[in-house]
Structures are given as structure tokens and as C-alpha cells.
Image: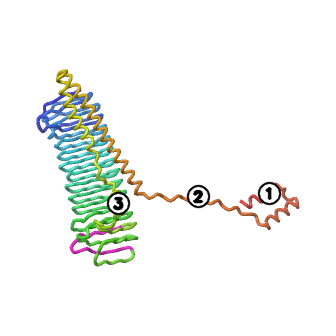
Amino acid sequence: MTDKYEVGKMPHLLIEACRGDLVVKGWGDMTVMVKGDDVQVDEVDGGLTLRSNGRLRLSVPENSSLAVTHVHGDTIIRGVQGDVSIGSASGDVILSAGAGAKLGDVQGDLSAKNIDGAVSVNNISGDAVFRHVGDMRVNDVFGDLSARGVNGSVIINTVAGDVGLRNVTGDVTLKSGMRDANFRFLGGQTDIGEIQGDVRLYGELAPGKHAFTAAGDIVLRWPVQSPLLLTATAPQISNRLQLEKVFEEDGSLSGSIGEDGPVVSLTANGRIILKDLHPVNDEWDSFRDEDMDFDFSIDLEGLGAQITAQVNQQVARVTAELESKFGTDFSQKMSEKIARQAERAAERAEKAAERARQRVERQRTEWQTPPRRPTPPTPPQKQKKASAEEQLKILKMVEQGLITPDEASMLLEALEN
């Protein structure tokens, strides 16, 4: 079914249940277009209440606000400028644009991009990607987490996978990370719990105290023109920074650059490596540290939007030709069929792009993990021959009739083994 409802410029839409995939797109019309099978729509003051027993597609005014109780499939919401809330989602969630977003439990992956306001999420069972959002509040992530371009603060409880934070203007709080962590250009105060893997820290930090603890290695890349007061503690420390007032003793190093810099404390169970942020002759090292960073910059999510835009142009052209030859009704039916196929192709492209991203992540892990040396086979145990004295005793026992020749042979074999 396809129905349209007049709602005004800023309606509030409540989706109580969607038992399939949910796709919501903002548009410039002041109506809501509903596409789906077995959909119940109730017109209420200020908006609509919807329930769907299958797949549901909505085209809504771009200034709508949206509340979703539960989605049994994947969720895609684009171009909705109002607030968005999702109680729970059984599949992946993709959010693009919006004043703010509040999510409960996401059973798949989450992608939130271009959100002007705050984003809060309870639990994410898969990976999480945030790009150009406001304040971030995330409880637990059971996959990897990558955030870039955060205009505000970041508070995260636990991440089971890798953590990547880049270009954050506010304070950062991370209780614990179970694998590696990359921090680039953090503009506020930091409160980082223990990281079970390695830590890579790039760029200067805000004035104040900052502490980083890793069960593995810590690599600090610091701009040499920025002041710093540093203390490092680890079994092995490699210093390539031009530090002043250096004091070294077994397992620790302290030093400074300039005056009145941030106080940075590094503690690692592995190595601590201190380097210039922009090395002059360090190409291979730069390749290892930066090009293999899991927080890669390739962004394929826009592929679906590109396909949709190109197909829409062709649909408009074909519709005009059909209308001139066969009439308005026929051309409208055909254009709707073409549009549905285009939307499905765009969604398939986005899902394929996400799978490609995950493959790159797995390859990065394989590239960064050095191959294990093959275990040499265990050499065969040398057989111990019976001594001449033992052989003589067994021979005398045969001569005296105490044992048979077969029993003597068994005794000799037992002594050798």
C-alpha cells in the first residue's frame, strides 16, 4: 500500500512497532508518504502513530521529530532534522542528519553522522561509527568504536574492541578498553581507564593532567613546538623527542618541552615510544603507525545516496516520456516501481560498503599481527641400547634355562625403549 497524509511542517511521528526493516527519509513536502504491507496509521494531534507487521518506508517532512519503540530489522533514517529516539533495534542502525538522537539497545552495528546535537546510546552489540556529532554518551560497545569530528564531550563506559577518537573538542572519559586505542587531537581534559592493548596518542593536549595506562605498548607522537611535562613508566622506553631536564632511571623517564605545558603520565606494561608528530625521515614508521590505523578515512556510506540521486534523475526523465505516450496513471505506476528498485539497490550498496569496511578492519588486524615462527618438530627420542653387562646377564639366564629366547628378546627390547 502507498498512502499520503497531510501533517504540516513539523509533525511528531510515533512508530510503535515495525516487524521488518524501517526506512525513513526527509523531504520538502508537508505530507507523510507511507509504503508497506499491513500498516496501521492513526492520525493524532500533531502527527501520526504507525504500526507495521512488515517492512515500512516513510517519506516525511524534513523537520519532523521521530520516536520509534522497536524495530525488528534494520533501521535507516536520513534527512530528518528533528530529534530521533529509538527504544531498541534488532538489526543495524544508520542515522544521517538530525537535531539529536537517543537510542536504547542496538543489536547490530550503528552509524551516526551529521547529528547537530547530542547522541546517547545504551548498548551496541556490533561496531559503532560516529562522524560530526555533538556530545556523545555511550554505555557499552561490544565491537569497535570510532568517533571523529565530535563537537562536544565524549563519555564511554566500556568498549570490547578497538577505540578510535579523533578531533574531539570537549572532554573525554573512557572507563576501559579491551583492545587497542587511538587518540588523535583531543581538545579537552582526558580521563582514560586502563587499555588492555596498545595506545597511540597523536597531537597536543589541553592544559591540565592527563594519564594513559596500557597493558601493551604506548606510542606518543607530540608536536615539538608544543610545551609538555612528561613522565613515562615502562620496562622499555625509547625516546626520540628533544626533551629538556631529562631524568632517567630503571623503568622510568621524565622530561619537559618548554614551560607550562600539560602534565602527561604514561604507564605501560610493554614499551613506551616517544616521537615527533611530524618526523622528517621516518617514512616506514609513519606507514606502520598511520596507514594501518583502524580508524581509516575511507567512507563508502555515501555510495547509496549517489546511486539514488543518479537513478532519481533518470526516473524523472523516463516518467516524462511515459506520461507523454501512455498517460499519467501508467507513468506514475512505472515510476513507483523503478523508485522501489532504486531504493533496494541503494540499500544493498550501503550494506556491501559496510561489509567491505569490516573486511578492511580484519585485514588491518592480520597485517599488524606479526606471523608466528613455525614450531620446529620434536626430534625423535634416541633409543638407549642395552649395555654389554645387561646383555651378558640376559644371555646367562637363557643358558641356565631361567628364561626362554623369546623372553630374552622381550627384555632386550624393553631395555632399549
Q: What residue sits 64% from the left and 59% below the top?
A: 380
Give the quadrant of the C terminus: bottom right
Q: Earlier in the sequence, mark 3 or mark 1?
A: 3
Q: What residue sits 23% from the left and 74% below the top?
A: 258
Q: What residue sits 18% from the left and 41% below the top?
A: 80
Give the quadrant of the N terminus: top left
- Magenta span dominant secondary structure: strand
Q: Position of residue 283 (x, y in %)?
A: 34, 63
Vertical side of 267 occupied by 174: above or below: above
**Circle 2/circle 3 CB separation < 8 Å:** no
Q: Amino acid at mark 2?
A: Pro
Q: From this viewpoint, is residue 62 visible?
A: yes
Q: What residue sits 23% from the left and 26% below the top?
A: 334
Q: Nearer the viewer, mark 3 or mark 1?
A: 3
Q: Earlier in the sequence, mark 2 or mark 1?
A: 2
Q: Secondary structure at mark 1?
A: helix
Q: Amino acid at mark 3?
A: Phe
Q: Quadrant of residue 302?
A: top left
Q: Position of residue 52 (x, y in %)?
A: 26, 31
Taking the image as shown, residue 109 lies to the left or right of residue 322, namely right
Residue 305, numbered label: none
Span colored in magenta: 251-267
The residue at which mark 1 appears reads as: 409
Residue 377, numbered label: 2
Q: Position of residue 389 (x, y in %)?
A: 80, 68
| Residue 90 belongs to the span the image colors magenta | no
Q: Secondary structure at mark 2?
A: loop
Q: Earlier in the sequence, mark 2 or mark 3?
A: 3
Q: Quadrant of residue 405?
A: bottom right
The residue at which mark 3 appears reads as: 287
Pointer 2: residues within 10 angstroms few (<14), some, or many (20+)?
few
Q: Position of residue 221 (x, y in %)?
A: 30, 66
